[in-house]
Amino acid sequence: MSEQKLYYYDSYVTEFQANIIDVIPYEDKYALILDKSYFYPESGGQPADIGTINDMEIVYVTEGQGSILHIVQKQAAAGPANCRINWKHRFDNMQQHTGQHILSACFYKLYDGETSSFHIGKDSSTIEISVESFDNDKVEKIEALANQIVFNNTAVTADIVDKKELAAFPLRKQPQVESNIRIISIEDCDCSPCGGTHVNRTGEIGLIKVKKIEKLKNSYKFEFVCGSRALKDYTYKNYLINKLGAHFSAPEQEIENAFFKSNEDYKNLQKQLSQLRTEVIHYDSQQLQQSAQDINGIKLISKIFENRDFNDVKLIAQAMVSNPSTLALLAAGTQSCQLIFARSENINVNMNDLLRTILPLLNGKGGGSPKSAQGGGTGDVAAALDSAVETLKSKLIALI
Ligand SMILES: [Zn+2]
């Protein structure tokens, strides 16, 4: 099997000639089996290569039936294969993967942290490290050491050995296979078994940057980016900083203070606005109370607010019916309206029933309790409210 995996020996080959020796059905697609392949099948947290074979797009590469399976959409014939690997995608994976080896080695060296999982995602990668506590100071130390290894531009080499030869390698972790064990060595840094694709020298990785840390039950998860991904991330963050700097009219170093000050100002204004709103609602409810119709000692207020937030209208209604012997039939909006019907505790009239009698006039819907009901609809809201007032008057007279 390892004879087939030519990427074991050279991760930089992107074009090669091979032979399709078998084509087998694979789910709703087909798997091409070559006599040799540089295509990397997804495994160990590293995504599969992408590319073409005889100009057919390779949608996925995996291992199965003792072979590397190159998955294509359509049936193909056995014979010569002209193979191309997407280099941008391959090199990106090589940068992230070799960066992971270095980070894992740094966690192990500085904090005895062992890597329990690794995954290269679409935009960033993650590793899970078994450490009990971690903080930003430690992250900075990890990054400093990892990037120093990049700047040293040391060699990354691969050896395929058998079990007897393993003793010569200072392994960070033990291999999971018994034979054809591939050891990746990074000079002055790391030595671990791995079947992935790596760069030849650490300088090719570019910047290694930890973006986020997340505490898990017995470990920490670290999100990181290397190389082109780190540049993309820096570009975005620079764009964001410049945009925020322009927004706050502040130099880069003062953006953080400017943001928190602005946030504090906003909270204070919200508080003031809330106080003023309460005062206005109190004032409005008192004014309305004075314009109420008096029906045998019960105050009845009916009003349409053309341009008022319905939440305010509800608060006005609540404020009015907190007084005894008061009924409030209020609406917000004219054509399309929302309604609140509310009463004081001491009046025995069902507001829910009253609302339901006039909702058909507005093709509306709604409901509530005997004390307070709300709804909405579209139509002649003035006529609907008048109708509600008339119904109410007859009910009040009947109560006497
Ligand atoms: Zn590796």
Image (cartoon, rainbow, N blue to C red):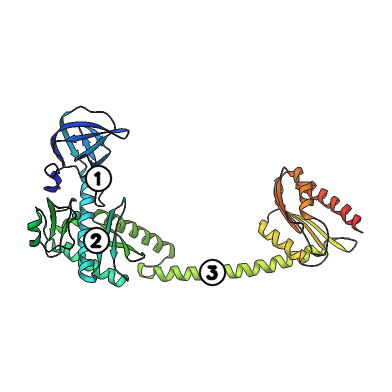
Which is more foreground, mark 2 or mark 3?
2
> Is 309 left or right of 260, judged from the image as shown?
right
What amino acid type is highlighted by mark number 2?
Answer: Ile
Q: How far across and down, in percent of the image, does residue 97 sit?
A: 22, 54
Q: CA distance from mark 1 to mark 2?
A: 22 Å
Question: Type of residue at label 3?
Answer: Lys
Q: CA distance from mark 3 to mark 1?
A: 50 Å
Does residue 348 appear left or right of residue 339 in this picture?
Answer: right
How crowded is the residue under tag 2: few (<14 C-alpha within 10 Å), some, or many (20+)? many
Which residue is situated farthest in the right direction here?
400
Say which residue label 2 marks.
208
Image point (81%, 63%), residue name: 326
Can you give x and y, in whole percent of width and height, for residue 75 in the image?
26, 28
Residue, disc 1: 48
- For the residues labelled 2 and 3, the Cα–Cα distance comes to 39 Å
The correct choice, above or below, for 234 with respect to 275 in the image is: above
Say which mark, if any, is on residue 267.
3
Q: Which of the 4 image quadrants contains residue 157? A: bottom left
Q: Residue sitting at 29 percent across and 72 percent down?
A: 137
